[in-house]
Image (cartoon, coloured by chain):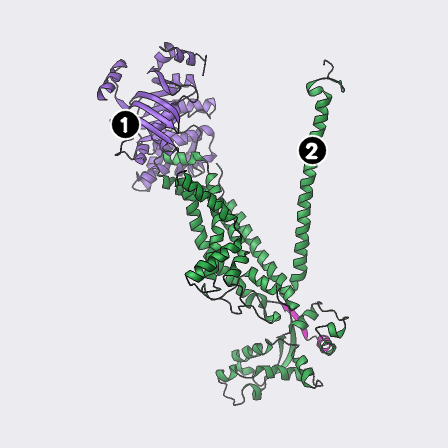
Amino acid sequence: MQMQAETNLMSDADMAEEIVIETQDVNVFYGDNHALRGVSLDIPKHQVMALIGPSGCGKSTYLRCLNRMNDTVEGCRVVGKILLDGIDIYGPQVDEVLLRARVGMVFQKPNPFPKSIYDNVAYGPRIHGLAANKDELDEIVLSSLEKAGLLKEVQDRLHSSGTGLSGGQQQRLCIARALAVRPEIILMDEPCSALDPIATAKVEELIDELKENYTIIIVTHSMQQAARVSQRTAFFHLGEIVETGPTEQIFTSPIDERTQGYITGRFG
Amino acid sequence: MTDLSNKTGGTGWNSDHFRKNLARRKRSEKRFQRIGLGAILTALTLLAILMFSIFSKGYTAFIQTSISLDVTFNEAIIDKDGTRDPEALRHANYTKLVQESLRARFPDVEGRSNLRALFGLLSNDASDTLRDMVMANPELIGQTLSVELLAGDDVDMLNKGYIDRDLAEDNRRVKDKELVWIDSLKEEGQIVTHFNSGFFTNGDSREPEKAGIAGAMVGSFYTLLITMLLSFPIGVMTAIYLEEFAPRNKFNDLIEVNINNLAAVPSIVFGLLGLAIFLNVAHLPRSAPLVGGLTLALMTLPTIIIASRAAIRAVPDSIRQAALGLGASKQQAAFHHVLPLSMPGILTGTIIGLAQALGETAPLLMIGMVAFIADIPGGINDPATVMPVQIFLWADSPERAFVEKTSGAIMVLLAFLVLMNALAVFLRKKFERRW
């Protein structure tokens, strides 16, 4: 296994990046439906990895394997190895609650809790006991909102409802909420699909800033978005990874015919 | 085809067939609206008739007729030794005092049967009233006071116009000689009417003029308290477990089917269950609110579970995902987010279930809460009855005066039900959150 990981790394030929997540031959089944077929993918640290592909190709399924959100789906079975810093996250010593604190997630539809903006961001630190007192909690909330680029807009109404914000603000609030738990990796499942172009631009800008400190894996249907924000791209098709590599390479000189077909809009 | 104004020919949207079909659809829509409106109007009319019948019969239950008499607190009758010993005062013959007062008012009445009819003008509660006065203030002894004493139910009924004076004397509850006395009292302004506070403070009684619903109200309160304390937490916890934690398998499907069936089981069956388990096996006290509450809790549980499950299911999955994605455990997601968000629906379901329990009679008949109980229950183990059973008992009583009591009690019960439903609406509005 170790050998294989190394060869993968070398064949990438790009540079000797530090790999955070190693996926080895992962298969996912929903009941009898074989949703993900032998997916192997290495995710480098502090970069944005874009997952693209037509609907139903398994990219969201793959994303949800990384923080074990698939565990909550009835009848879902994951086979294979997903190593986070060399430790199998489906192994017995890994607790999914702790895992989800390390691997945060932002969903397709902005889903703030129907509570105040402050309570939304403070919820994660509260349940994990990250703040010893009120001042520390305030500090975490404010810095998370700052990192998500939302602080200026909501500074004077921290205690009004999070659901009263606009769609783009709500999504950035969800990002702030994820950041407040101090994750290492952030998974984003089509975070801009429900947003208008201006809000999308803001979120993309934010993703670009966040990659300094976080590893980001983003599922997107927008080729332009993938091209704009990501350093590496993986193309999924029918539950398999067809091609993966530096984003530039995927979009300019894809090796596989199917990749080329998809990015030029001939199918998918 | 080219002529769009052509009304007779054409194809597609312009064809005769299309126009005819459109007219038919419009007619069908109008018809449906009219039928719907008609159904609602019929229901409202029937409800109005019901309400009118109850209110017109029942409002007099809140009015009480009394007779104002000059009572001489004769020391020779009350306390002939002059000791003012409370024990002696309690057991003195106050009935004689009442009778003396009536004889003083009508000195020319003679003969045993005539005198008995005369004494019948007043309720036998009158002597208790005098005793209470003397016990509270022994100074009264020796004085003469004008005291308002509760009239008997026949006088009350006559005063409220329920007894027809034109009937033949044989068919009339109030005889001619009594009519003369009553009219004489009326002329002197000695017949007075008041708000019937006793209706709300007295327990049940064989004498209609003394009967009140306080006992039934307190009984209902204790019973419902037990029901609520048991069925609300158990029902909500069950709903959370089934919705949020239980795996989908055959066993849980079976549980679900059974809960749905239980909600449709006739309530008297729960009464039989209560009789078999709580009385015959557990030997809990008969006729007690404890047993009534346990039985009604069994009956209310399915309602609460079904309503709570529906409310929990209505919470968007994105909220659960958001919490789980932050590293909340399943239990934290359920109790921090799902439960608070489903609370309005849960509370509405619970209050509707409890309102149902408040109006339930049949299961309580099985566990002995149908007994005649004059005392107001002091706890959950005392014999008691509840409001709907009280209504049932009074509706079954032969005295004319119990008719208005029945309607009056129904009005009180309806008032409680309206109050509970208003509370449900209020709580729903208060806890409602939008997202």
Residue of label 2: B28
Number of residues whose C-alpha sits closer than 10 Å to that of mark 2, classed few (under 14), some (14–19) or many (20 or more):
few
The kind of secondary structure element at disc 2 is helix
**Front in this rendered view, residue A246 or A173:** A246
Q: Position of residue B181 (x, y in %)?
A: 71, 78
Q: Residue at x 33, y 21 (%)?
A: A39
For chain A, the rendered hue is purple
Chain of residue at mark 1: A
Q: Residue furthest bottom?
A: B81
Q: Quadrant of residue B106?
A: bottom right
User: For the residue marked with disc 1, what is the amino acid?
Assistant: Leu
For chain B, the rendered hue is green
- Mark 1 on the same chain as mark 2: no
Q: Which residues are magenta?
A: B182-195
Chain of residue at mark 2: B
Q: Residue furthest left?
A: A3
**Front in this rendered view, residue B382 or B218:** B382
Residue B225 showing in the rendered view: no
Residue of label 1: A84
Q: Position of residue B109 (x, y in %)?
A: 70, 84
